Image (tube, rainbow, N blue to C red):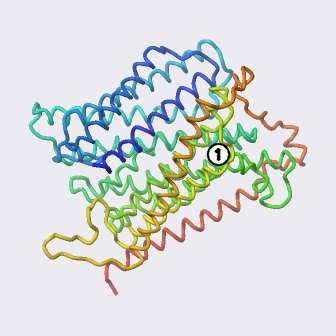
Amino acid sequence: MVLTLHGLNVLIFWMIFFEIAILYFCSSVLLGCRLATPKWAWVAFLLMVIGAVMNNVIVLQGSSSVMMTSYVPLEAHPLFYLSLILFAVGALIGCFVFFGTLVVAKNEKTYEGSLPLVTFGAVTAAIIAVFTIVSGAIILIPTFLWSVGLVGEINVLAYRMVWWAFGHSSQQINVAAHVAVWYAIAAIVFGARPLSEKVSRTAFLMYILFLQLASVHHLLVDPGLSSNFKMFNTSYAMYLAVMASMVHGLTVPGSIEAAQRARGHTAGLFTWLRKAPWGNPAFSGMFISLVGFGFLGGITGVVMGAEQINILIHNTLYVPGHFHATVVLGSTLAFMALSYWLVPVLFRRELVWKGLARWQPYLFGLGMTGVSLFLMGAGTLGVPRRHWDIGFAGTGGITHEFPAAAYTMLALNGMSVILAVVGGAAFCLIMVGTILFGKKMGDHMAEPCIVAPVTDEEYNANGGSAFAIPGTLILAMVFFVSFALYYFINWKYLAETWGVG
């Protein structure tokens, strides 16, 4: 019951609430225009709130402990499915309000030229969101009708295939959204501009075309899908989405390095990074998010998404270890980082407990890094997920004893959870405290206080070498080497399971 509640609250409700907020901000605030159809926006918000609260109440009553995936023929209370439908409809309306606001901005000419890159990233997230939410409706509406007796049965394979177009793709919304946040914070804190707008926009476009296809890695042992379909989606198509993420992983820190070098931090390979404002939670949270998402979430996602290797780890604790690295260490920490700038700007109040705010991203980031690493470590040793007792007690004499290292991993995971919860609670206290008790700053904070972009003159002042980003290239090479080593180590694990020699 608790795990069902946890999964839905953090993977669906928290994420999509914040993503809809990002859509509104990237359209109305960044483009300086009025919000289209504010009444419909309130309807959307109310539907999302009602759906989320209803779902929590139903799950806590104990009749809907079917996990976030709610696989049929496990049956939840009808209101469980209805609550998700209401939430999805509200989110879908929010996406349409976002698109309408873009039309308003275009017609009223509140911006010139193409959409800003951050808003373009939000458009990517919104397009993926529409696909995702419609997929959820396609499968949840008949499942709701089945739960009330109006539909005889739901095909299990069809449910899994369509549901994962919702369940996994909902996490692709936040990938696009948090990458847009990375670009926004680079501009806010450093006045950085993308190394190449066209390349970054192309990478976002690749998200639309290929990112959702990674959903198929949840279906690799399902018998009803052809091997050709599985292999195409988990190799050629998935690698194009991975390439898009690696482009962003290069261009975001590269743009920061270029801006730092243009402003005089030119000594050595990493002076630009050492001189970054590590005490600013907006920057530290973003950079920890970027590194954690790339090294932990990205590399392990490719490994577990490969059809052959997937079978080693899919039903182990490796899987929740992976998505804590993507959804929490990647997306949630990026959203926290943006909040440290956005809440004071929108509410015109100074942050409370600034000392705690400086440390909060490190507490949360370190805790979630531990959660991800130790869960994946336990999973690599074979510890299963979704089982009430990993020792299989009470199963008719079936027993299995894991290596002592597995239990050590689980203990270290528990300690990491405590640290992460402290960091998460600190964030909540700082945000709520700022809104309620922060010192008022006056109307001069009404406009976003973004640092002025680095000018062409500043770039050229360093001999035209501002776009030489040697430090970022070194970091990228470290990433590639780590990626290759870990990828082939897992192929070695797979070879050892075959027992051919």
Residue at image point 87% right, 40% down: 458
Compared to residue 340, the image places residue 115 above or below, namely above
Position of 131 compared to 153: left or right? right
Identify which residue, 225 or 402, lies in the foreground.
402
Residue at image point 54% right, 54% down: 293
Position of 439 compared to 135: left or right? right
> Which image quadrant: the C terminus?
bottom left
SS of the residue at dot 1?
A: helix
- Residue 261, percent from left and from top: 82, 49
Question: What is the residue that sits farthest to the bottom in this orientation?
Answer: 501
Compared to residue 141, the image places residue 481 above or below, namely below
Residue at image point 25% right, 53% down: 225
For mark 1, does the 10 Å Cα neighbourhood hold few (<14), some (14 to 19), or many (20 or more) residues? Answer: many
- Residue 329, percent from left and from top: 52, 52
Q: Circle 1 is placed at which residue position?
A: 357
Position of 64 compared to 375: left or right? left
Compared to residue 153, the image places residue 223 above or below, namely below
Identify which residue, 90 or 432, lies in the foreground.
432
Residue type, mark 1 in image: Ala
